[in-house]
Each structure stands twice: as structure tokens, then as C-alpha cells.
Amino acid sequence: MPQSPAVVFPARRQVEFRAITVPDMGPDEVVVRTTWSWISNGTEGSFLRGERVNGETPWRPGDPEPFPLVAGYQRVGVVEAVGDQVTECTVGQTVFATMTRVEGMHFEAGGHVFRGPVHRSQIWTLPDGLEPRAASGLVLTQVGYNCGARPTLSPGDAAVVIGDGLVGHWAAQTCQARGARVALLGRHPGRLSRFQAGAGDRAVDTHAEEDLAAVGAWAPEGVQAIIDTVGSVDTLVRLFPRLRHDGHLVSAGFCGEKGTIDIQLLRFREATLHSPSGWSRPRMDATLAWLAEGRLRTLDLVTHTFPAARAAEAWELIEGAHETTLGVLLDWSNV
């Protein structure tokens, strides 16, 4: 079977760049050579620390260790071969791809892989004029889009986004594009500084301000949506008194074993709880269209780029909780 360089987590808190085995291409698959991949700091970091056994299930004592695994789930690249059943793309096209099938790993697929087969359903051709790097984190961008698209919002409504990471920024951008006023809550001034606040928007440094008081002063009429992108049910509940009647809660962060919320509490305001997860074709299509139209921005959130072979250094930076670190890309041009 073919070999390909990849970013591998062989054990907790260990990162390697090494060759792995990938299967031969099937008739309904496409071989993609990666040019850029975008690290998902939160999800991939959780796997690196051994905190979960799959996308939504926390690791518990007694569970098998989910290693080794190929990290990641998103990148752009060039089509090198197509199976007999594939009509969606052609050799030489630049595409976005999710996960490549791999062999000999705990999971049968991964994203930070130089070359390998991808199912035709997990390929998106890029619109003309869209820079490939801008789409290299499309799955994660779609998570933010999904957070901001779920609540019912009218122009001028107030929406609170918890978390100044990538998903928080894209959720805030989506709410802004829908006409809402946005308060982005976070603990990292460097990340908050990248929020492009419009009229009526604000960034709240929760180290400097108490979040409930800040939100109350900003939107005394109440907020239409509270969107949690970091997995903090405590913050959702703390801010709940500011929610309007018939308002919306959105929970997209990984809560681990601390995801309990009292449904009876929601009835006080007849609130709707949304719990988006993963990705779907319609949402990915919509996100890609918004990127092409400029309604979502990605490149201004890129703070660091590393050659793919130096992925371990990228992870050292991310796990060091560098307060300005946001988008971290891997460049595969010299592999």
C-alpha cells in the first residue's frame, strides 16, 4: 500500500511527523495532495490530551487510549486522481477535502495527511477567486457559521458569543452578517482585538469585567441569543437571566462530562436550546458561499504558519496557551 507523510499523535501530548500507510483509491474516491491544512486548536488539542475517544464522547478511566491517530479533519489541495464513479471534480483542480482514509491507526481517517484517498462526498471544489488558504479550515468555519445561523435573529437584536477562539469569531461574524449586534466574550485581549466590531458591537475581556454585568449594561433590553463556543454550561446558565422570552441558547463547545443543563430552567423564558455538531453538505455549501461573498473572513484570523514537518512546534505553541494564537496553518509545499 502507498505511504504518505502525516501528522500523528502516537500517545498523549506527543506529536510526530512521519510516514503512514494509506489505502489504494476506490472507485468513489479522489486522491488529494494537500497544500494547506488548518489546525483545529480545540478539537485536536482535546484528542492530543487524551480527553475524548471520539468527536463527542469524553475519555473515562478504563476506556482504551485512542492512539495512535492521524490528527485533523480539514485541508485544501490538488486533485491527483479520481475514481471511475467520480464526476464532481477533475485532475488538477484545487479542492477542499475533509478526512483521508488511513491504515494502522486507532481511527480509520485523518486530515493532516499529504496524499491519500478521500470519499467523493467529502470534496468541495473552490469558487473562482477564493484563495485556497482561506478555505483550508472550512469545517471549523462551518461550525461557527452553524452557531450563528441557528438562532432566530432580527436586525438590531443582541447576541452574546462566549469564547474568543476561531469558532467564537466565526459565530460572531455570522451574527453580524445577519444584522445582529454582537458582544464577544473572551479572556485573551490579543484574540479579542481581532474582532471587527461594528456599531453597537463590543468585545468583553472577562478578566477585566464581570460578564453578567457587562452584558446587562450593553443590552439592557435583553439578548436574543447566547452562543457558547467553549463548552461552558456554567457561563450559559450565569448569563441566562439576560435572555429574552423566546430567546435562544446555542451550545457548540465540547463539555466533556460537565454538559448538564436544567431543562426546567429554559421554560422560564420558553428558550430554545440548539446543539450543533459535526458538518453537513448543506452547511458546508452555505459556508463556502459566504466565504466567496466575503460575508465570513478567515485569513485575518491566521496568526501562525508552520511547515508541515514542524507540526510539533505548532502544537507546542498552541498547547502553551499563547494568548494571541488563533489560526494556525500547516504548509505542505515543501513535503
Image (tube, rainbow, N blue to C red):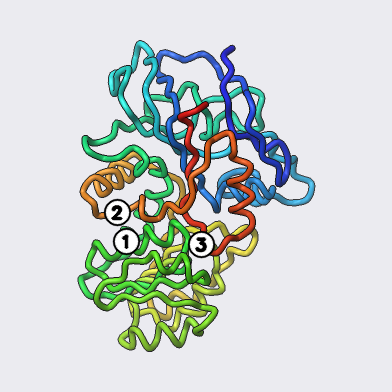
Corner quadrant of residue 245: bottom left
State the separation of the CA atoms marked 2 and 1.
Answer: 6 Å
Depicted 272 relative to depicted 142: above or below: below
Q: Nearer the viewer, residue 43 or 316?
A: 316
Query: Which element type, helix, strand or loop, lies under badge 1?
Result: helix
State the separation of the CA atoms marked 1 and 3.
Answer: 19 Å
Q: Residue at x 29, y 54 (%)?
A: 296
Q: Residue at x 38, y 43 (%)?
A: 138
Q: Which mark is residue 173?
A: 1
Side of 128 where 52 appears, left or right: right
- Give the labeled residue for mark 3: 324
Query: Which element type, helix, strand or loop, lies under badge 3?
Result: loop
Q: Amino acid at mark 1?
A: Gln
Q: Which mark is residue 200?
A: none
Classify mark 1: residues with Cα within 10 Å, few (<14), some (14-19) or many (20+). many
- Give the labeled residue for mark 2: 296
Q: Amino acid at mark 2?
A: Leu
Residue 70 image point, x, y percent: 60, 34
Classify mark 2: residues with Cα within 10 Å, few (<14), some (14-19) or many (20+). many
Q: Nearer the viewer, residue 300 or 110?
A: 300
Q: Residue at x 29, y 31 (%)?
A: 125
Circles 3, 2 touching at the beta carbon (< 8 Å):
no
Residue 253 image point, x, y percent: 51, 59
Query: Which element type, helix, strand or loop, lies under badge 2?
Result: loop
